[in-house]
Structure formats: C-alpha cells, structure tokens
Amino acid sequence: MTAEAPADPRVVAVDLRMASWRQGDCVLGEHWFALRIDPALPLSSAAQVAAAEGADLAEEQVRGLVVVTQTCDIARSCVERPFIEVCPLVEVDELKLQEIARGRRPGYAVVPELVHERLVADLDRTMTVEKPVVAQWRRTPGCNSDAEGRLFAQALARKRARFAFPD
C-alpha cells in the first residue's frame, strides 16, 4: 500500500476559495468576455473590431460576469471539475427588466442582488473560465436566499429547456 502524495497547495487554495461560490454569484467591475468569431463575417461590434485586426477571437468589456455553473459542480475540486461557466452582465432599461422578471425574455436572467443596478445575465453568451481564475475574483453574491437561487436556476432552465418554436 502506498501513501497518497500530498495535495498541491495551490489546488487546496483554489478549492478553499471556490467553496463559498454559488450559482448566481457575480464578479463586478472591468472584466472581459471572449468569443470566437469568423473574421470573414463579423456580426457583432466586438467581432468587427477583432476582424479589422485580423483576429478570430474577440474580447468585449462587460460590467461583470455571473456564474451559471451548478453549485454542486463549483464545490467539487478544481482537479475533478476545472471549469466554470459565466455569462456577461448587461444593463437593461426598467421595462425590459420587468419583462425578464416575468419570464418573458428567456435569453436573460434576473440577478436578484443586482436588480437595483438593472444588471441582468445575458444567457445568449456563455464563456468558460478555469477555477483558478475565478478564485482570484472578488465574489459578489447574486442570490441571498434559497428562493432567489431557485428562481435564478429556473431562469437558466427556461433558456435551455423551452420548446423551440420554428420562427
């Protein structure tokens, strides 16, 4: 029988930092959202800038990011589950915020703790980040109760599980 090698202290530190993170948590401030593009047909403004520079990867500054990975996967060791999925936070007007809160815009999710800033999750865009990066961010809780967490999870499910209308 052999003894297990001691855990890498960097892995332990990342796992400890990630232990407090939950689905719906955010990071606010200057952050960048990356997306792969086709330089021959750049559709978004970020893609057009990148294509003009000859790149096939665009970055766009966003107000923040929200974690959409399930909490159970966040809690698992970064060795087993190294990735976190995030969506950009976007500012919307009051009318659009109300529509999102009523479930009438499945491409978005209300982040309860950011309603006062009218920031919502843009679910049409998702980026993958490794946990050591997220562990360096300053966590802002997005949901402060189980009920809020369930509503956020339902908004995520509504985006992925809704019936696909042909038009």
Image (tube, rainbow, N blue to C red):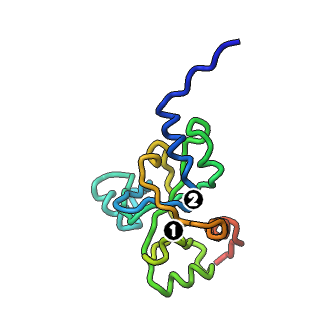
Q: In the orientation shown, which residue stands out farthest toward the bottom?
A: 95
Is disc 1 surrounded by few (<14), some (14 to 19) or many (20+) residues within 10 Å? many
On screen, residue 159 above or below 5: below
SS class of the residue under badge 1?
strand
Amino acid type of the residue that numbered disc 2 sits on in the rendered structure = Val
Q: Can the viewer see residue 108?
A: no
Q: Is residue 68 left or right of residue 136?
A: right
Query: Which residue has dot 2 on it?
Result: 68
Residue 145 picture location, percent across and down: 62, 67
C-alpha separation, residue under disc 1 versus residue under disc 2: 9 Å
Amino acid type of the residue tagged 1 in the rendering? Ala
Disc 2 element: loop
> Image height check: is 42 above or below 134?
below
Q: Name the spot of residue 64 as percent of width and height, x first.
A: 42, 63
Q: Residues within 10 Å of mark 2 (few under 14, many from 20)?
A: many
- Residue labelled with disc 1: 121
Work out whether mark 1 precedes mark 2 in sequence or the reverse, and give the earlier one: 2
Q: Which residue is nearer to you in this view: 151 or 96?
A: 151
Task: Give the answer, above or below, for where 90 lies relative to 82.
Answer: below
Whether residue 129 is visible, yes or no, is: yes
Q: Residue at x 56, y 23 (%)?
A: 6
* Outermost residue, left side: 53
In the rendered image, residue 46, in percent from the top left (x then y), is placed at 36, 63
Query: Which picture quadrant has residue 4?
Result: top right
The residue sitting at 63% across, 65% down in the picture is 149
Q: Are marks 1 and 2 in contact (CB under 8 Å)?
A: yes
User: Which image quarter is the N terminus in?
Assistant: top right
Residue at (53, 47) in percent of width and height:
18
- Furthest-top residue in this view: 1
- Residue 142, position as x, y percentages in the image: 52, 65
